[in-house]
Image (cartoon, rainbow, N blue to C red):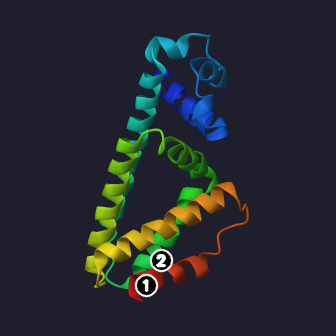
């Protein structure tokens, strides 16, 4: 792994484990098993490191959005199933750390968080329109609120696996009722 990628991966894990307050050059160096000062050579200021993390997450989001656009749904139950699979992916062991990083960074970086949210919302609105939903703007916001709540709850409060049947039913209700 290239040094820059190694530092970014370590920084993501540091934030996932200890929140944004724990993000220091020294903590990243320790996590990456690099000599002290290595992170500072590539990212002189903490803000440079935070910007690199946000860029990394943004690039990952764009790829996920691209993949989601390729999945064509034509019925509300398909949208509900797709959203449920998305929630499962966000809280799965291999993605939970990145999702925690996003949650930790959102309040500290509202402009980037807003860009992510608006992009997700636009994709959801297009998907609901294709699925024939009415009042797409209100339904999209309600779906996003529920999705955020399920993810937050799963990552912070309740370690049990997500009840996918119930989650899918609630998404379907939000889309159709």
Q: Along the horizontal axis of the image, is 11 left or right of 52? A: right
Give the class, few, some or many, for how many residues have Cα within 10 Å of label 2's Cα (few <14, many ≥20).
some
Residue 160: image location, x then y, percent? 73, 65
Q: Along the horizontal axis of the image, is 134 left or right of 171? A: left
Q: CA distance from mark 2 to mark 1?
A: 6 Å
Residue 16: image location, x then y, percent? 61, 40
Residue that badge 2 annotates: 81
Residue 84 vs residue 151, the one in the foreground:
151
Residue 50: image location, x then y, percent? 46, 30
Q: Along the horizontal axis of the image, is 2 left or right of 62? A: right
Circle 2 SS class: helix
Q: Taking 135 as reference, is 162 above or below it?
A: above
The residue under the point 47% across, 45% down is 106
The residue under the point 65% across, 25% down is 31
The residue under the point 44% across, 24% down is 47
Residue 43: image location, x then y, percent? 45, 18
Residue that badge 1 annotates: 77
Give the class, few, some or many, for how many residues have Cα within 10 Å of label 1's Cα (few <14, many ≥20).
some
In the rendered structure, are the residues bearing label 2 and label 1 in contact, judged by CB atoms less than 8 Å apart? yes
């Amino acid at each position: 792994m290239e040094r820059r990628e190694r530092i970014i991966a370590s920084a993501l894990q540091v934030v996932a484990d200890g929140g944004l307050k724990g993000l220091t050059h020294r903590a990243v160096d320790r996590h990456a098993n690099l000599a002290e000062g290595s992170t500072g050579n590539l990212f002189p200021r903490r803000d440079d490191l935070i910007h690199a993390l946000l860029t990394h997450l943004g690039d990952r989001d764009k790829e996920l959005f691209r993949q989601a656009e390729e999945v064509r749904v034509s019925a509300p139950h398909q949208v509900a199933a797709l959203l449920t699979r998305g929630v499962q992916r966000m809280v799965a062991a291999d993605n939970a750390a990145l999702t925690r990083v996003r949650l930790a960074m959102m309040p500290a970086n509202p402009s980037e968080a807003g860009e992510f949210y608006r992009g997700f919302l636009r994709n959801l609105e297009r998907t609901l329109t294709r699925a024939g939903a009415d009042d797409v703007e209100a339904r999209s916001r309600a779906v996003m609120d529920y999705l955020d709540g399920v993810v937050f709850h799963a990552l912070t409060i309740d370690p049990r696996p997500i009840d996918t049947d119930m989650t899918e039913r609630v998404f379907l209700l939000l889309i159709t009722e």
